[in-house]
Image (tube, rainbow, N blue to C red):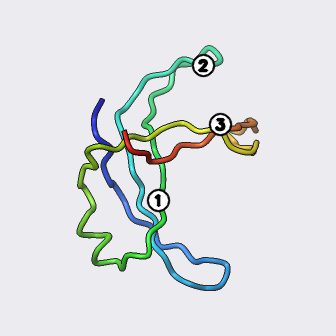
Amino acid sequence: MSSPVIVDINKVETKDGKELFQLLIEQEAFIAKADGSVRAGTLKCRVLTDWNFAKCNSVKGKALPGYAIARVECDPYEFTVDGEVKLFNHTWVLQKA
């Protein structure tokens, strides 16, 4: 299994107006068959950080050996896929491998 890689940075604002950055992390592509169709995807997660933009930008493209993106259970939520609302009860997080 390949190491996750930091692929992008997003600025986010907290409810109290504080600006933080979110690192988009991806790990290995996969092909999945569901509901009669085949889809290509990538395991992805987002990690919130209080680093400044320069620090976040300096780690963009870096691999994170010793970590993996893992599926974990969470409270149910709705997500729209190709116009169809689906109910999910899992999310993806970065964990020590």
Figure quadrant of the N terminus = top left
* Amino acid tagged 1: Val
Q: Position of residue 14 (x, y in %)?
A: 61, 77
CB-based contact (under 8 Å), mark 2 and mark 1: no
Q: How many marks?
A: 3
Name the secondary structure under disc 1: strand
Q: Which residue is mark 1?
A: 47
| Marks 2, 3: nearer the viewer | 2
**Disc 2 packing (10 Å; few <14; some 14–19; many ≥20):** few
The residue where tag 3 is placed is: 82
Whole-angstrom CA distance, mark 1 to mark 3, is: 26 Å
- Residue 59 position (above or below residue 66): below
Sequence-wise first label, 2 or 3:
2
Q: Residue 30 location, x and y as percent?
A: 41, 27
Q: Helix or strand or loop: what does disc 2 sit on?
A: strand
29 vs 47, left or right, is: left
Which residue lies under the disc numbered 2?
34
Report the residue that reaches farthest toward the bottom: 17
Q: Camera-side residue: 96 or 48?
A: 96
**Mark 1 surroundings within 10 Å by alpha-carbon count, few (fewer than 14), some (14 through 19), many (20 or more):** few
